[in-house]
Each structure stands twice: as structure tokens, then as C-alpha cells.
Image (cartoon, grey):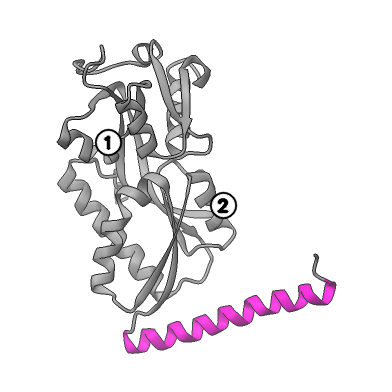
């Protein structure tokens, strides 16, 4: 099914009418101080599973009249949703190079090697990719932000993904951790995902040398009209991420120096 020429005209004007309607509502809310409406937020898998539940819960306590819908996908999928106006903004776990989007880094995450407690690498203080490639490796799927960051890291070390002994590719951090706990292989995952396993002492987590660091970022369209509730959630999320990063010992993004 395709639109006729008349249908395309109606579609274009409809978008403008709906945006004007939303602007009108937003201007009224600005005058009354009211923050209401429905937000559609997208998040990559690690962020959605380990950061957003507490963040959105805290936001809802402050803004009870705002309804939030969450779309979950890998980083590539979330970036595409923002580009295509399918969501109001996204939170992702890999560098975003699209110059048409506003990207705000909220914290720097570290990725570490995980292995069973009785693995030969378990007692090491640090490991290199040369150490990792000697053992079976459990990987995230293609398109995953984690996979993209690890691929880039391998290239920086003069290797590539094919140098790893990949025994399994899985679509979520939880699946990867369960595979490692079952001694299928080793894996590289976000430190953000490891609180439960480290507390229960079911896995060993070892930093890589050199370390793998990656940004957790908020992304949105540069020129899209922004609902007042979107602005409130963005501001809230930035502050919340910064406070949690300090509590958990994560690095904060470097702030640009002020020009004199």
C-alpha cells in the first residue's frame, strides 16, 4: 500500500497540525507549571535492565502525572528510533557518531572480563586481549553497543573480532552471564551489570589492560519540538546519572574547559 500524491500532502500537513497542537498544549503547561503527558523513551539493553528502572521510578515519584512508555533494543535500533521520530529520546551504551542528533554523555562505564570462580584467569588483577583469546568466548549479538565497543577495542589492540574463539552469541547481558556461570566460556560485560553476581560471589570480574571505557549517553533530535515533560525527564536523568555514578565509583564525563 502506498500513499497517493493527495495522501502525501495530507500526511505532511497532519504532522504540522499535530506539532502545533502539541506546542499549544506545552505553552499552556509552561504558564501553569503543569508537567503531564506521555513520553516514549528508548534504551539499549544494558541501560534498560540495570539503570532505567530506578531512574524512572524516582522520576515518577516527582512527576506522577507523566506516563512513560519504554522501547528496548540494541544501540543501533535505539539510534534509528530517535532518527525516525519513533521515540522522544534514547539512552544508549556506545559512542553515537550521528551529527544530526544531540548527544549528552552522563557517565563513563567500564567493561570487564568475567569468568567462573575456578577459571585460570579468575585470580588475575588484570588481563589483556591476548589472555582472552586463549579461551572460549561468549559474545553479544551484532548491533549491540557492547559488541561495537569491544570490536573497536580489539582493533585498537591490532586484532579483530575473528581473533576471539567465539563459542556463542547471545542477545542480553543476563544470558551472557548465565552462560559464563555455566562455564561455556569467558565474556566481556559492563561493570554496571555485575552487582548481583559480585555480591553472591558467583563470578570473577577482572579489569582489562588497557581498560575498556565507554560512554552512557542520552540522545535526541536536535531540531524536534520538545514536550515540556521530555525536558524535565532529560534534566532529571542527567542529574540522577551523575549522582549514581558518584555513589558507584564510576567516572563522570570530562567537562569542557571554559574559554576565557
Q: Is any part of residue 105 visible from this angle?
A: no
Q: Position of residue 42 (x, y in %)?
A: 45, 57
Q: Which residue is mark 2?
A: 80
Label 1 Cα crowd, 10 Å radius (few <14 / some 14-19 / many 20+): some
Q: How far, Cα to Cα, is label 1 from label 2?
A: 26 Å
The mark found on residue 191 in the picture is 1
Q: Position of residue 127 (x, y in %)?
A: 28, 16
Magenta-drawn stretch, dominant element (helix, strand or loop): helix
Q: Position of residue 68 (x, y in %)?
A: 39, 68
Q: Quadrant of the N terminus?
A: bottom right
Queried whether the magenta region covers residue 224, the answer comes back as no
Residue nearest the observer in this picture, 26 or 68: 68
Q: Quadrant of residue 66?
A: bottom left
Q: In this rendering, would 150 be left or right of 2?
A: left
Queried whether the magenta region covers residue 26, the answer comes back as yes
Look at 24% across and 73% down and name the residue there: 62
Q: In this rendering, would 244 be left or right of 31?
A: left
Q: In this rendering, would 202 be left or right of 10?
A: left
First in sequence: mark 1 vs mark 2: 2
Residue nearest the observer in this picture, 179 or 241: 179
Amino acid at each position: 500500500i502506498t500513499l497517493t500524491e493527495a495522501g502525501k500532502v495530507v500526511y505532511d500537513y497532519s504532522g504540522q497540525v499535530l506539532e502545533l497542537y502539541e506546542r499549544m498544549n506545552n505553552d499552556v503547561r509552561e504558564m501553569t507549571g503543569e508537567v503531564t503527558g506521555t513520553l516514549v523513551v528508548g534504551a539499549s539493553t544494558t541501560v534498560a535492565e540495570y539503570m532505567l528502572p530506578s531512574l524512572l521510578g524516582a522520576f515518577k515519584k516527582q512527576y506522577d502525572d507523566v506516563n512513560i512508555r519504554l522501547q528496548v533494543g540494541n544501540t543501533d535500533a535505539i539510534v534509528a528510533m530517535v532518527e525516525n521520530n519513533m521515540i522522544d529520546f534514547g539512552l544508549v551504551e556506545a559512542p553515537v557518531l550521528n551529527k544530526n542528533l544531540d548527544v549528552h554523555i552522563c557517565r563513563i562505564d567500564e567493561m570487564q572480563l568475567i569468568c567462573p570462580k575456578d577459571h585460570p584467569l579468575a585470580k588475575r588483577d588484570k588481563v589483556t586481549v591476548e589472555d582472552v583469546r586463549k579461551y572460549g568466548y561468549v559474545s553479544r549479538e551484532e548491533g549491540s553497543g557492547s559488541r561495537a565497543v569491544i570490536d573497536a577495542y580489539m582493533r585498537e589492540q591490532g586484532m579483530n573480532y575473528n581473533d576471539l574463539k567465539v563459542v556463542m552469541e547471545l542477545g542480553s547481558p543476563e544470558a551472557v552471564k548465565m552462560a559464563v556461570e555455566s562455564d561455556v566460556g569467558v565474556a566481556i560485560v559492563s561493570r554496571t551489570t555485575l552487582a548481583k553476581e559480585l555480591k553472591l560471589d558467583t563470578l570473577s570480574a577482572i579489569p582489562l589492560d588497557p581498560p575498556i571505557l565507554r560512554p552512557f549517553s542520552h540522545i535526541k533530535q536536535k531540531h524536534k519540538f520538545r514536550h515540556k515533560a521530555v525536558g524535565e525527564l532529560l534534566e532529571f536523568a542527567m542529574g540522577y546519572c551523575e549522582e549514581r555514578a558518584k555513589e558507584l565509583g564510576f567516572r563522570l564525563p570530562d567537562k569542557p574547559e571554559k574559554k576565557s
